[in-house]
Image (cartoon, rainbow, N blue to C red):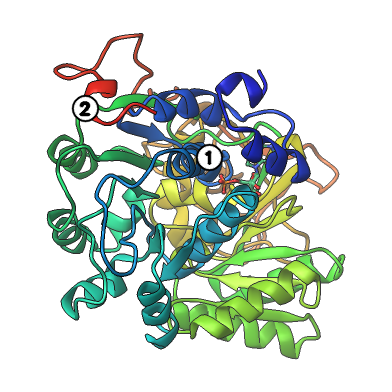
Amino acid sequence: MTFENLGLAPALLRALDEQGYTQPTAIQEQAIPLALAGHDLLAGAQTGTGKTAAFGLPLIQYLATTPQEVATRGPRKPRALVLTPTRELAVQVHDSLRGYGKYLRIPSTTIYGGVGMGNQLDALRRGVDMVIACPGRLIDHIERRSIDLSGIEVLVLDEADRMLDMGFLPSIKRILAKLPKQNRQTMLFSATFAEPIRELAMEFMRDPKQIQVTPKNTVAETITHRVHPVDGSRKRDLLLHLLAKDSRLQTLVFARTKHGSDKLAMFLDKSGIKTAAIHGNKSQGARQRALNDFKAGRINVLVATDIAARGIDIDQLPQVINFDLPMVAEDYVHRIGRTGRNGSTGEAISLVAQDEAKYLRAIVRMLGRDVDLRDVPGFEPQTPIRWGNSAPGKAEQPGGERTPRRNGPQKHARRPHSEAPRHAHAGPKKHSSGPRREGDRRPGGARPSQARPAR
Ligand code: AMP
């Protein structure tokens, strides 16, 4: 399959060629023809699958080839709105869309909080076709009437699950109420499809075509998952030990809290590893600077919280370390989506204390594959991981099922380190509850070509 076969305009093909995109990814192959035909889309895809181009290319092609439906006086009204959960993702989507549309004139702007209103107001006054916005700041603009959404023809909800997790549902509903209902194409991208997302889709979409590339919760086969059991109090030292093995390696470290990521970044930095932290309390400028420094190799370690890391696009990251395990197993997938991309190998290392065993169990079950569980010499935990009765792969249980203690309370009998590592077994894999790709069924009611202008 080539991009030509998908029906894209020459100006887009040229830009893609320059960016080195030779072949569409699976989500692009499925989404682009449907989106070009004007269908609403409910797409199951996470960061790293090429989802931005999957909605961005048809969106740009539409704007470039279809005259504005309503002639407007004064500055042009935006015709396309992309909603994203975070500022980083808004910036990244905007950069990607500008790259794809570089041979087409599609004025656009981003709208997000944490920065002054001035530039955004200027851009809106000049007039744009495309707005990439975070819900909170967009509501501010709606309230001060600095944006008119009555001309929106295409709406994209990017990472809808994350927007809902972040409590944006009421804002999204307010925004949707400002959009025209007729002749609007809506594309919703989400890694997961919990009930609230389905409800949102039912309410605001018109017979959406459903597509899914990565069955829910799958991760690249090229990633190795390694777990180091360790006492919580020794995690920092173990992390330093692991990082110091090769201080040139670019590593993304995940911590659960903002405060925790700050403290950890400070500790690593003081220990001689060039580190920065990004999280929701940092200004947009500071986050962007840290990200740029990391990408440029000026710092080697970026400590991030889950939300701040959403949408961070760093290709070919060799390793991701979970300093804390995420409490929601699906976040593990998001975290390690930064490594092992495009067939390259990657390593996901998790430092797991006894009180995190329950999270590890859920992750192993979700991954549906074995996890390499091994102590690091010198950092063996005093409190072993207990898997409990519901442990997956009970026959060969790691951690808590170790040989009983010997030689007093502090010491455990252990295999020599040269021994093959233990494995945490996954047990039977759960089936995806996400949407399936539909056949060639036409949308009920109006055909897309009737429901909106033909393209
Ligand atoms: P996304 O899932 O949209 O965040 O994209 C993940 C990464 O894949 C980005 O760095 C894109 O530039 C890159 N990418 C997207 N589509 C392709 C493609 N067809 N060929 C090569 N790289 C791509």
Image location (x, y in percent) of residue 86: 42, 65
Q: CA distance from mark 1 to mark 2?
A: 21 Å
Q: Quadrant of the N terminus?
A: top right
Q: Quadrant of the C terminus?
A: top left
* Mark 2 neighbour class, 10 Å CA radius: few under 14, some 14 to 19, many 20 or more: some
Image location (x, y in percent) of residue 38: 34, 29
Name the residue beneath numbered marker 1: 57
Residue kind at label 1, given as amino acid type: Leu
The residue lying at 75 percent from left, 50 percent from top is 316
Snapshot quadrant of residue 138: bottom left
Residue 130 higher or lower than 61, as above or below: below
Question: Quick one: SS at disc 2?
Answer: helix
**Which is more foreground, mark 1 or mark 2?**
2
The residue lying at 66 percent from left, 57 percent from top is 320
Residue kind at label 2, given as amino acid type: Ala
Q: Can see residue 11?
A: yes
Q: Nearer the viewer, residue 383 or 4?
A: 4
Q: Can see residue 409?
A: no
Quadrant containing ligand 1: top right
Q: Earlier in the sequence, mark 1 or mark 2?
A: 1
Image location (x, y in percent) of residue 72: 26, 59
Residue 298 higher or lower than 368, as above or below: below
The answer to whether 223 appears left or right of 68 in the picture is: right
Image location (x, y in percent) of residue 91: 52, 66
Residue 346 higher or lower than 438, as above or below: below
Which mark is on residue 361? none
The answer to whether 6 appears left or right of 135 in the picture is: right
Name the residue beneath numbered marker 2: 451
Question: Quick one: SS at disc 1?
Answer: helix
* Mark 1 neighbour class, 10 Å CA radius: few under 14, some 14 to 19, many 20 or more: many
The residue lying at 45 percent from left, 82 percent from top is 119
